Image (tube, helix red, strand yellow):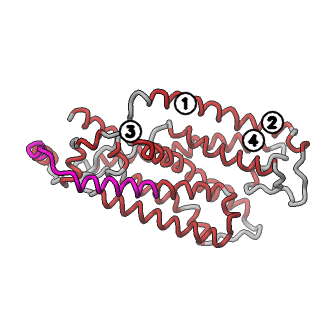
Amino acid sequence: MTKSAGEDVGIDYWMKWQVMVCGLIIAIPAAIVINIIKSRNRNLKKSQNLNNYLLWLPSWRNLHPKWLLLYRAFAFLSMAFLLYQILLFAGLFALYFYTQWTFVLVMLYFAIGTFVSAQGCLMSSNKAPTGNAEKHKVVEKESGTALSSTNLQLHDGGDESHEGAGVLGSLMLIIYQTSAGASVLTDLVFWFILVPMMSGKQFQLTLLIGCIHSLNVVFLVIDALLNALPFEWFGFCYFILWSITYVTFQWILHACGSTWWPYPFLELSTPWAPLWYLGLALIHVPCYGVYYMFVKAKNLIFSKLFERAFVRSHGWILQHHKAA
C-alpha cells in the first residue's frame, strides 16, 4: 500500500515504532559488513590476492581473450541501448527503482570489463613467446590438446600474470560480485512478488520491461561461463551495502517530502513493515548463494566434463602459477 500524493510525511510518521525497528534492520547489517570490509582491506594491504590476468583471461584453454572482449563489448552496448530506451520511455523517473540502479551497475561492470579485456589482449599480443617451448610440448602431450600460444603462455606463467589487479581491477571484481547478487534479487522480486501483486492493476508487462528484468542475469551468467574471476562469499558484504544504499536513498527522499514509494514493501506506515524489511534482508542470502553455487558448480562440472579444455578458474590457475 503506497501513500497518496497529498498525504504528509511529517515528524509523526518517522516516530512510529515500526520505523525504528526497520532502521535497526538496516543499521545493524551495515555496521557489521563495514567492519568486515575494513578488516579485510587491512589484511589485503600486506598481500594482493587478485592477479591481473584473472580479469581478462577466459577459463577455457583454447579460447582467445579477444572473444571474451567481444562478448563484454556486446553486452555493454546491448544494455546501454536498453537503458536508453527505458530512459526515453520514463525519463529520469526510471532511476527511482532498484532495478535500474542494478541494471546500470551491471552495465558498468561490462564497461570496465571491456576496457580491461582490451588492455589484456593488447598486452598478450605484444608479449613475445618465452623460452617454455619444451614445457609447452609436455603439457600438450599430457592433456592431448593443442593449446593456443596466448592462453598457454599465460596459464603457464608469463611475467604479467603475477601483476596485481590494481584499483580498477579490484573495483571490477567488487561490481561483479555485487551486481550478481543484486540482479538475482531484482529478477526474483519482480517476477515472483511484484508481477503477481500488480496483476489486474493497470500494469502492462512489455518486452522492454521484461528484458530489463531478465537480461542482467543472462549476460552475467554467460560471462561467468567464460571468465576466470573468483566469486567469494566476501562479496556478499558489498551486495548488502548496495541494497542499504538504495533504501537509504529512498528514506532521504521521503525525509525531504516525497510521499511515493517505488516498491510497496518499503512503505513504513504499515505495522507489517518490519516483517517486510526483515524478509528482504534475509532473501539476500539465497540470492547471493544461488550465484555463488552456480560458479562453484561451473568449475566442478566443467573441469570433469571438459578436462582437457576447461581451466578450473581461480583456484587451479593460482595453484599452477605458484608451482611454475
Q: Report which residue position mark 2 lands on.
A: 20
For the point 37% across and 51% down, the residue is 227
Labels 1 & 4 near each other (Cβ < 8 A) = no
Report the span colored magenta. Answer: 111-136
Q: Nearer the viewer, mark 3 or mark 4?
A: 3
Q: Report which residue position mark 4 lands on.
A: 275
* Front-most of residues 130 and 173: 130
Horizontal side of residue 24 vs 5, given as left or right: left
- Please name the amino acid that badge 4 sits on: Leu
Q: Is residue 121 above or below residue 79?
A: above
Q: Is residue 193 above or below residue 15?
A: below
Q: Main secondary structure of the magenta part?
A: helix
Question: Badge 1: how crowded within 10 Å, few (<14), some, or many (20+)?
Answer: few
Question: Badge 3: how crowded within 10 Å, few (<14), some, or many (20+)?
Answer: many
Q: Nearer the viewer, mark 1 or mark 2?
A: 1
Quarter the C terminus occupies: top left
